[in-house]
Image: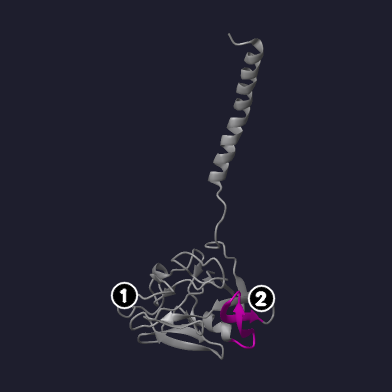
Amino acid sequence: MISLFKKYQIFGLIILMLGVLPATVFSQAKKQANPSKTTSNATDKGVVINGIRWATCNVDAPGKFTANPEDAGRFYQWNRRKGWETTGKTTAWGGGVPKGTTWTKANDPSPAGWRVPTYAEIYSLLDTKKVTTKWVTQNGVQGRKFTDRATGKSIFLPAAGCRNFKNGMLDGTGSHGYYWGNNKPKGNNAYSILFSEKYAQKTVHLCNYGFFVRPVAEK
C-alpha cells in the first residue's frame, strides 16, 4: 500500500512534469527553428568606396563570402562559376578559354544581392582623387587597403596570388593580388586589377587565369 504522503508526492511530481516539460520542449523547438547565424555568407552589408558599395570579404565557395576580410576565398577563372582552392596543386585545370564578353549572371559566384564588378567599378578603386590605397598587414595577412577620402571608410583586399593560366600552379601568394572585373575588351583577355607592395594598377589578363572576386552590391 502506498501511503497518503507518498500519493501526494507522486501527484505533485506529475503536476510539476506537466507544467515544465511542455515549456522545455517548446523552448528546444524554438531554438531549432531559429538557429544562430554562422558566417557573413549572405549578411555582408558592404562599405561604400567612391560611390560603389563593396563587399568586405572575397567570394569563397559559389554563393558564399569568406568568414573574414583577410581570408583569400577561392580562385575563379573569368566567367566560370567553379571555385578553386588557394593551396596545393590541381590536376584538373584547363577547360579552354572562357567565352563571352561579359561575366554572365548564371556563372557569377557572388552571393545573392552581389555581383562581379564592372571594369569601371573595379578601376574606381584606383581613382587617387577619391581613394587612397596603402600596402598593409592586417591580422597577419598582407594586402592593400582602399580608403574613401571623403568618409574614411575602407576595404582590405588580401594579396593571395593567382593560379597560372597554363597549369593552375600557384603564383604570387602573399606578394600580389589579382581581382577580376566582369568585362572583356577584346580577344581572350578580361579586365582586372593587380597590386603588390609597390603598386596598384589596371590590367587585362587571359581569362583562364585563376583570380579572386570581390563583389559589389547589385543596384
Identify the amino acid type marked 1: Thr
Residue 163 image-quadrant placement: bottom left
Magenta region, mostly helix, strand or loop? strand
Residue located 50% across and 76% down the image: 117
Is residue 38 among the parts visible in the rendering? yes
Q: Is residue 144 magenta?
A: yes
Classify mark 1: residues with Cα within 10 Å, few (<14), some (14-19) or many (20+).
Answer: few
Tell me the CA gap for discs 1 and 2.
Answer: 41 Å
Residue located 64% across and 80% down the image: 147
Which residue carries the number 2 mark? 153
* Mark 2 secondary-structure assignment: loop
Q: From the top left corner, tell me how far across and down residue 180 is, in percent.
A: 46, 79
Q: Is residue 109 magenta?
A: no
Residue 10 image-quadrant placement: top right
* Mark 1 secondary-structure assignment: loop
Which quadrant of the figure contains the N terminus? top right
Residue 91 numbered tag: 1
Residue located 44% across and 87% down the image: 204
What range is drawn magenta here?
127-148
